[in-house]
Image (spheres, rainbow, N blue to C red):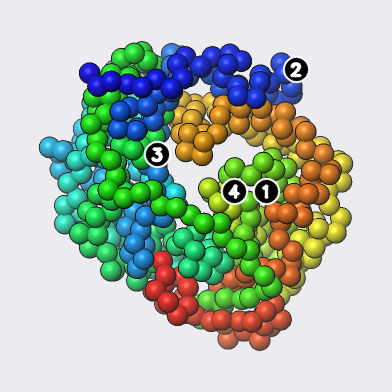
């Protein structure tokens, strides 16, 4: 059996809290159950949480890198690889691999994100040896067969084309990030563009596998009905000899905020609606003020009764929905306001969204709005930690971003500690002014071109262009 370096064994009770235990009388307080952490010789990091209420096990595996490791002009490599890892591995071709999972009712999914590949698996505890073996094969011994690659790439291109044709809401975030971040790595579309996907071959995917996947990039969180000692042995056997990634983990600089307003108009002739995205650089996953930011966003655009949805949907009827949110990454990702409206009410809807953002900055949050948002957040948080899969996902997230259990255990205290001063500071530092926004509009340019020029200099591209940014081969 391979040697294990134990980092933290049987973390329980108050010792689970780097910042001290949550007060027992804190309303809405939630604690992570006891777990342990360890590191394999090759650098793979593991968290184990025994939970014996059901005969089930959930695994979340994270491989650091994600779309950040895509070569320029080959955006979508990580996403294609994530699909291919499930299309045959080890001694099993795609059909046999799927049959092995289905034969025991297990589930396995692999997706690419901006900063990581994320693997989720759930299965009966009696089948752990089989499923962990399949997972190890998928990550370390994928087949990457040419025929499967062609099918996956074709399906990805068709999916983008279909979204452009029928419902561009699914893609407006890609246009928004590309327009906001430009050449910064956060401007890359995780799934790639039609242009970048066409440039990727099987050799590119194999190169990504060699350079960006390895035991030193692996984080494994396992929750459920197992013996920790036995699970340590199985994981060491399955992953302990995995080589290190061929390249260093991608580094990301902090992106600069956008100054002034500039507009990208994506022409979709004949469109009866205009889809709009208003954004700027927001806040990171590690921002100390993230609880205040989330509380403010709950009031502003994070729930049905938010300011944005109330103004744009409930009062004016200009849209069926309006929302705002943060994309939290290692460095600040985008803060965005997203909605859509009939072509003839494009300016009315955007003006109202901007006026609502101005009101947030001018008026701040009233005490009753803060109290309501606190109650909402405290009520929404516990259900995110109910299942084995949710707990495994949370543990993997904590390990990925270097956070301790106190991120969960002190959540309620930190939310309740947000006062009007903290909310005002969050508004000032993390929510853009209406005068500083990257604006993306997808609609009939012939009908809205002149009217939207008042929002800033307008750059145009066609919805049929095989990329998400004008004039350069971006993903």
Secondary structure category for the residue under label 3 = strand
User: Where residue 284 is drawn, which disc sits there?
Assistant: 4
Q: Nearer the viewer, mark 2 or mark 4?
A: 4
Mark 1 vs mark 2, CA separation in Å: 27 Å
From the viewer's perspective, is the residue at label 3 or at label 2 nearer?
3
The 10 Å Cα crowd at callout 2, few under 14, some 14 to 19, many 20 or more, is few
Identify the mark at residue 25; answer none if there is no mark: 2
In this view, the mark in front (4 or 3):
4
- Front-most of residues 445 and 259: 259
Q: Residues within 10 Å of mark 1 (few under 14, many from 20)?
A: many
Q: Earlier in the sequence, mark 4 or mark 3?
A: 3
Q: Which residue is mark 1?
A: 302
Residue 101 horizontal/vertical position (percent): 25, 33
Which residue bears the numbered disc 3? 62
Residue positioned 70% across, 29% down in the render = 412
Q: Nearer the viewer, residue 136 or 445?
A: 136
Give the CA distance from mark 3 to mark 2: 35 Å
Q: Nearer the viewer, mark 1 or mark 3?
A: 3
Estimate the x, y position of residue 75 in percent, counting from the top left: 36, 62
Marked residue nearer the N-terminal end (1 or 3): 3
Q: Earlier in the sequence, mark 2 or mark 4?
A: 2
Q: Is residue 279 visible?
A: no
* Quadrant holding the C terminus: bottom left
- State if disc 2 and disc 3 touch (CB < 8 Å): no
Query: Helix, strand, or loop for circle 4?
Result: loop
Q: Position of residue 224 (x, y in %)?
A: 41, 20
Vertical position of residue 2 compared to residue 325: above or below = above
Q: In the figure, is residue 110 to the left or right of 406?
A: left
Q: Is residue 66 left or right of residue 324?
A: left
Of labels 1 and 2, earlier in sequence is: 2
């Amino acid at each position: 059996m391979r040697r294990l370096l134990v980092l933290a064994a049987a973390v329980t009770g108050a010792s689970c809290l780097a910042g001290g235990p949550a007060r027992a009388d804190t309303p809405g307080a939630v604690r992570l159950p006891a777990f342990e952490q360890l590191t394999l010789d090759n650098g793979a990091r593991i968290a184990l949480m025994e939970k014996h209420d059901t005969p089930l096990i959930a695994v979340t595996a994270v491989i650091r890198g994600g779309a950040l490791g895509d070569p320029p002009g080959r955006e979508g490599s990580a996403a294609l690889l994530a699909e291919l890892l499930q299309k045959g591995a080890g001694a099993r071709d795609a059909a046999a691999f799927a049959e092995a999972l289905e034969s025991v009712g297990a589930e396995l999914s692999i997706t690419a994100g901006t900063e990581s590949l994320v693997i989720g698996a759930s299965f009966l505890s009696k089948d752990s040896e089989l499923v962990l073996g399949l997972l190890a094969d998928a990550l370390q011994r994928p087949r990457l067969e040419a025929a499967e690659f062609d099918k996956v790439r074709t399906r990805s291109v068709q999916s983008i084309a279909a979204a452009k044709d029928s419902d561009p809401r699914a893609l407006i975030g890609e246009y928004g990030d590309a327009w906001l971040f430009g050449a910064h790595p956060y401007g890359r579309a995780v799934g790639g563009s039609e242009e970048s996907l066409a440039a990727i071959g099987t050799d590119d995917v194999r190169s990504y596998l060699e350079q960006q996947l390895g035991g030193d990039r692996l984080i494994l969180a396992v929750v459920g009905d197992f013996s920790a000692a036995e699970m340590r042995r199985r994981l060491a056997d399955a992953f302990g000899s995995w080589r290190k990634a061929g390249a260093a983990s991608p580094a990301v600089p902090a992106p600069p905020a956008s100054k002034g307003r500039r507009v990208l108009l994506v022409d979709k002739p004949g469109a009866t609606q205009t889809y709009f995205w208003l954004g700027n650089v927001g806040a990171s996953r590690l921002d100390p003020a993230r609880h205040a930011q989330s509380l403010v966003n709950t009031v502003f655009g994070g729930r049905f009764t938010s300011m944005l949805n109330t103004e744009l949907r409930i009062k004016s009827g200009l849209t069926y929905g309006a929302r705002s949110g943060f994309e939290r990454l290692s460095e600040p990702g985008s803060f965005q306001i997203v909605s859509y409206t009939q072509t003839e009410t494009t300016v009315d809807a955007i003006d109202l969204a901007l006026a609502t953002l101005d009101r947030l900055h001018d008026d701040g949050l009233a005490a009753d709005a803060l109290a309501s948002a606190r109650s909402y957040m405290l009520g929404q948080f516990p259900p995110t930690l109910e299942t084995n899969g949710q707990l495994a996902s949370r543990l993997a997230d904590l390990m990925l971003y270097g956070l301790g259990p106190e991120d969960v255990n002190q959540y309620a205290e930190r939310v309740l500690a947000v006062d009007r001063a903290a909310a005002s500071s969050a508004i000032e530092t993390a929510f853009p002014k209406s005068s500083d926004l990257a604006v993306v509009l997808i609609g009939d340019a012939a009908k809205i071109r002149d009217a939207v020029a008042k929002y800033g200099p307008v750059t145009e591209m066609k919805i049929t262009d095989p990329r998400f940014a004008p004039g350069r081969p971006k993903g």
